[in-house]
Image (tube, rainbow, N blue to C red):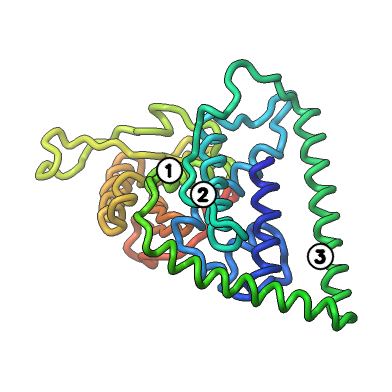
Amino acid sequence: MLCRSTLEMSLFWLYENDSDFEMPFDKSINSLLHTDSFRENIRSSVREELNTVRLLGNIASHAGKGNNVKTIKDTEALHALKCMYNFLHWIAKLYAKRFPGEAQFDENLIPRGLVDDINVKKVKELNQSYQEAQQLADEAYKEKQKALLQNEVLRKQLEEVQSLLANRKEEREQVIGALPAPPVLITELETRRLLIDLYLREAGWDNLQKPRDLEFEVSGMPLSTNPSGKGYIDYVLWNDDAKPLAIVEAKSTLHDVHKGQHQGTLYADCLEKSTGQRLLFFTPMGMKRIYGMTSSTRPDRFMVSTANRSYRR
């Protein structure tokens, strides 16, 4: 949740101080990550990293059923921390008075050992504090915008700050462009794999288990590519009637979307033959998902947000 809160504050700062970013009416994190100006100025791999922070923050802030808390894995928390390190370091390199150089992320600085158990009550308290801080920040922004409209001096001061930062940004971009590429802290494949899991968890598919839901075995694959005729589907999503509802082909798609679509079609055909159920198959591409149907009478491609739980019903 702290990474999500930090992300929100840094996005607000960016939209307020860099005129290349146009503040939308909806000031939620999700909206700020998807404006036209953000897409034009921030490369897709960074947007995907920040989206994992948003999704992990959403999961962490909602208590589970009963007395359980939806758990964020250590590796996921570390991923969110690395994403925010990358983003804040980028902001510092472009806008800070003193150029920070290529500082390295050091995992050894993270405290080790046992941590206090966080129960549902504690999560709700943390989330309440976050919501209150978010509301105060939103109100402060509105008051500032109101003051800018009414006060010529404040408006000129903001314009001067934006001009100063724009010039500094232009100079820094040239400096950064001449430097060797920094070491990769997070690969795009790591981020996209995590995004797939997070989108499924956000949609309610949060207790997937092998071998029924993950690496599900099917028969009937082309013998030309697999002599055994067997294949293993990355994700199978089941309906309430115990029939497969949809599959997600991740591994092939992460390398080549067309290969992923072909593989997804083959898997869907195998399941349709064995169950008589026509399936949706999803081939995720970062923040976009393509799905198709095994039925030849349906459109081949659609852009969708995620496999929503409503499909179960």
Q: Is residue 313 visible?
A: no
**Residue under numbered circle 1:** 185
Q: Position of residue 71 (x, y in %)?
A: 61, 29
Label 1 residue SS: loop
Left or right: 129 as drawn, with respect to 173: right
Residue at 85% from the left image edge and 83% from the top image edge: 152
User: Where, by quadrant of the figure, is residue 2 drawn?
Assistant: top right
Q: Amino acid at mark 1?
A: Leu
Disc on res. 141: 3
Q: Position of residue 275 (x, y in %)?
A: 35, 40
On screen, residue 309 above or below 27? above
Label 2 residue SS: helix
Q: Of the residues under marks 2 and 3, which one precedes in the sequence? A: 2
Left or right: 202 as drawn, with respect to 44: right
Q: Of the residues under marks 2 and 1, which one precedes in the sequence? A: 2
Q: Position of residue 114 (x, y in %)?
A: 62, 16
Nearer-the-camera pick, 194 or 105: 105
**Residue under numbered circle 2:** 86
User: Where, by quadrant of the figure, is residue 66 drawn?
Assistant: top right
Nearer-the-camera pick, 13 or 31: 13
Disc on res. 73: none
Do residues under tags 2 and 1 come within 8 Å of each other at their CB atoms? yes
